Image (cartoon, helix red, strand yellow):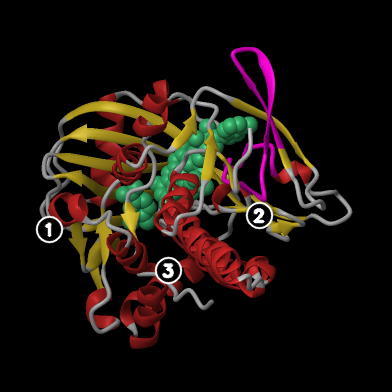
Amino acid sequence: MRTQVGIVGAGPAGLMLSHMLHLEGIESVIIERASREHVQSRLRAGVLEHGTVDMLKELGLGERISTLGLEQHAIDFRFGGESHRLDFHQATNGRRTWVYPQHEVVTDLMKARMQAGAQILFETSVTRIEGLQTRKPTIHFEQGGEPRELQCDFIVGCDGFRGVCRDAIPDSVLKIYDRVYPFGWLGILAEAPAPTNEITWGCHEDGFAMLSIRSPSVTRLYLQCEPNEDADRWSDGRIWAELHKRLDVPGMPPVNEGKITQKGVTAMRSFLAEPMQYGRLFLAGDAAHIVPPTGAKGLNSSMADVKVLGRGLVEQYKRGVADILDRYSQICLKRMWLVQRFSAGLCTMVHQIPGDNAFVRRLQRADLDYMTGTVAGRLAFSENFTGLPIEI
Ligand code: FAD
Ligand code: DHB
């Protein structure tokens, strides 16, 4: 088999890149380990940055966001028994975010790709890639138990944190930055309408909590927990008691209870691999970087990488100009370090960190006061949360 761009992984990054290339007449093949149903039903991120939504709309994928997406203008931070509403729409002169879950983005992308006759090999595992410093890099994969090969001009590793592509970069070249946090999130899906139409963060001395929205009748809730927590140790009664304690404040409608339909634990990690390119291999999305979910940057960062890479590949194929491709890693890493800074800073600001002393806890509270109570604090949060520009 042969193609122009071989893509490993049909998550949001792989599907979006393949869609962008298709619109410019560039051929790609995606190889995906999981089934189509599995890829489309994975419950993950919920918030889209302003720039991500613009990108989806520009690429003809905005129809369902316009009807199902919930536009957000503010976050309600709850701490010290009070509500502190941070209006990022006002602070940034009109920038906003949308609650539109990742599985809907994937569904839209999958539909567009399938309608265009995309070549996606599902339930097919890539075993290794080679020839990255040659003009004919090759993807080795297994299909129906048989070893096969895909020869490409370029290989793009969109295979997530546990994929195989990053490992193909020699240890002497690859530098890894990694931090694991001593807490996790218990994520809950409940059949209950949100009490207001705004996302609410509870920065409580017993641990962080968040109330987000998935649809007018479904809320997505998170509770800080142990990193290796067993979700079954959390009965429905315990979950609602903790959510009320960490999120409810006088004068605001309390969390609405409802049937819990899903619960699971997400560990927290900051991770970055440098460089994001090696010869004819490019890494995009979680394959290159992971952020703790607090800042809602995982999916959005994947889209930012793909925007740069898509533009670079189009320039290469259409005009024979390699400038953007050559600078891909440099362009993405500059922005990604700012995203890492925001995500890690926010994560350590709002969670209770085991072992921290009273002084550190008071500093956390001062950080929250500064972020919500000053013009500079509100602006800094707002420009990061709604999405930093992608400077190509
Ligand atoms: P992925 O979505 O991980 O896609 C990678 C794909 O590659 C997968 O489909 C995988 O099956 C495939 N693959 C891997 N190895 C191979 C192989 N060898 N051969 C073939 N295919 C392979 N972000 C937020 O912003 N907010 C959140 O609340 C949030 N919650 C999350 C919860 C969980 C449990 C996880 C895991 C992530 C969460 N994220 C969240 C992060 C966000 O979902 C990711 O940043 C986003 O999915 C990245 O997209 P991607 O396409 O780069 O990678
Ligand atoms: C979600 C919402 C957020 O505001 C955030 O910071 C992280 C995740 C969500 O809806 O999943």
Q: Are marks 3 and 1 in contact (CB under 8 Å)?
A: no
Of tags 2 and 3, which is closer to the observer? 2
Q: Earlier in the sequence, mark 2 or mark 1?
A: 1
Write the residue at 31% across / 35% down.
188
- Mark 1 surroundings within 10 Å by alpha-carbon count, few (fewer than 14), some (14 through 19), many (20 or more): few
- Mark 3 surroundings within 10 Å by alpha-carbon count, few (fewer than 14), some (14 through 19), many (20 or more): some
Q: Tell me the tag on residue 252.
A: 1
Q: Are marks 2 and 3 in contact (CB under 8 Å)?
A: no
Callout 1 amino acid: Met
| Residue 206 visible to the viewer | no
Residue 175 screen position, x and y as percent: 78, 57
Callout 3 amino acid: Arg
Q: Earlier in the sequence, mark 2 or mark 3?
A: 2
Q: Vertical placement of 121 versus 327: above or below?
A: above
Q: Are marks 2 and 1 in contact (CB under 8 Å)?
A: no
What is the span of residues highlighted in magenta in the rendered image? 139-165
